[in-house]
Structure formats: structure tokens, C-alpha cells
Amino acid sequence: MNIKLNIEDYKSYHEDYEQFLTNIEEPAIQNDIIDHLTPSQSYPEFFTDEEIDWLKGFAFSQCRYLRVNPNGTFFISGNFTRIFEKFKDKLETILPGCKESIVVKGNYFITPEQYGLHNDSIRKDEYTVNLNTVKEDDQKRKWVPWRNVIIPLMVSPQVESHIVFFKQRHVSWFTVYDHGADPSKYTKNYPATIDYSTIKFETCEGTQKIENNLIPYDKEHYQKYLSYTPYRRLTGLTVENTFEWKPKCPMVFDCYQLHATNQGINNLTWKTKMGLLLRFFRKVK
């Protein structure tokens, strides 16, 4: 991967957004979110090679923050306003209304491992960080996480791999899902849901019956696409879409939608993958 970096035209954007966030735990807010759930979608060959190269270069020359997970995953973020300014008209065609977002957040990720089951909502501390100065009932606190766009940027070696979007949405703060896991596996600083029996799962067809939360997952789909993960972890879930991870082909999905990836199939696996997650916000009534 040989990319020219645009270091000389660096610009820093002010992207203050926490003061506009409302509490997604409030029942009225949750109902508003549920009313706007939409099926996941994939768009073939949406970006050009030149645009993908520009996005790769931006990660290493224009972003402001770097975080590295213990598993070796790099998260790069900041200055995403610049990305949105460049691609807003194009993104509006696959996510109508995204131009109205109060801010565009998200991150690049460069990872040596597949992603386990999670949603891509915001962390609760993003909402609570300035409650002392901007109170919960402040009239400008009207914005919630809405929909995400994932843009695959590269995979090496180039083998077939996938991302699975499930019908289930969990209107909550960011969390990983690991039904039946040992509680000691996760620290208090890493939000995890390890018991699905009482979760209120939402789908585009309505609220899932609570007794369906413990139904075993489709074994055929599991064996083909998700056999890397403990089978119990997928309890109560059903497939909405299984999309191949292809550079230039973005996917759009609800922030609260559960999803997971694999590292390849048929014993052919990738070693490194890079993508870009863009998170958009919507103003509630």
C-alpha cells in the first residue's frame, strides 16, 4: 500500500458534540429511535480507487488521535468534518439526511483480528462528560446516534471475508455481547452484556419476544460464517444480512444494530484489515 500523504494542507476542526447529546435511556427517546430503525444495506463499487487512496492517506496525515487496543488494533480518529465535507453529497445518496447530522464521528481501524459481537453506539461517558455545565434538560440536548457507514479500505491478503448484521438492535450505549461469558473476562471499564435473557431487543418488525432471546442460533449459518466465535454468544440472534467485505463497497446500518465479522472462510484468512466507520446523529422530536 503506497499512499501519498497530504500533510502540508492539514486543518484542525472543532468538533464539540457532547453538549448536544440526549439520554438514550429515556423511554420517550428510545421510542423515537425505534421509530427510525432501518435495514442494513450494502452498496457495490461506490467509491473509486482514487477516493479510497485519499481516505487511506487521510488517516495517516490529517487525523488527531490514536488509540491501540491490547490485541494490536489501531483506532485513528479526529477531523472527520474534512472527510464529510469532501463526500457529503455522495454519502447523502446512500444515507439521506446525513447532511443534517450535528457532527460526524467514528474512527479508522487497522486490525489483525476479526471483530466480535457488538453495537456501534456511543459510550455513555460521551453523554455524561459535561452534564455539570450543560444540564440534562437543556433544549440543545436533542441529538442521538442514528446510523453508521462502514467503508472497507483494504484487506490483506485479499481473501473472501464477511460482516454479519443481525436483525436485533439494542437501543443502548456501546457494548459488546457475550452471552454466558465469565464475568471476570471483562473489566468495569469495558461495557459487556453477558446475559441476554432480559434484553429488550428491537427489530425493524417490532420488539422481539423476550422468550426468543434464548433460542439457539442458526447452526448452518454459524458453521459457514461465524464458527470462530463461541456458539453461545449468538444466542437469540437472527441474520438480517451477510455482506462480503469489499474495499470501495460501503455498508449502512443502525448504530444500535448487533453485528460481527469473520476472518475469512474455507480456511483462507486475512492478516490485516483496514476500514473507516462514520457515525451520524439525528435530532429527536
Image (spheres, helix red, strand yellow):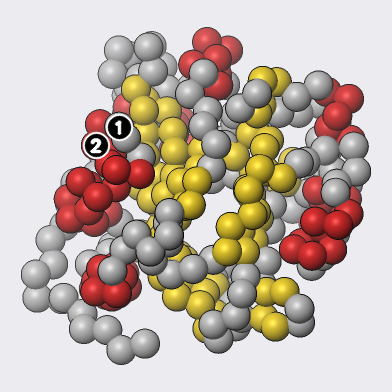
Mark 2: amino acid: Lys
Image spot of residue 132 (x, y percent):
38, 24
The residue wearing badge 2 is: 99
Rate crowding at label 1 as few (under 14), some (14 to 19) or many (20 or more) other CA atoms within 10 Å.
few
Confirm or deny contact between disc 2 and disc 1 (CB under 8 A): yes
Camera-nearest residue between 155 and 129: 155
**Foreground residue among 114 and 46:** 46
Residue 103 appears in view: no
Bin the neighbour count of mark 2 within 10 Å (Cα to Cα): few under 14, some 14-19, many 20 and up.
some
- Quarter of the image for residue 135 reads top left
Looking at the picture, does residue 85 appear above or below residue 54?
above
Most extreme residue toward the bottom is: 2
Give coordinates of residue 103: x percent, y percent.
28, 39
Find residue 3 and report its horizontal and vertical position in percent: 27, 84
Disc 1: which residue: 97
Picture residue at 68% right of the left edge, 66% below the top:
262
- Residue at 67% from the left image edge and 37% from the top image edge: 167
Question: Which corner quadrant holds the N terminus?
Answer: bottom left
Residue at (27%, 54%) from the top-left corner? 80
- Give the number of the disc on residue 75: none
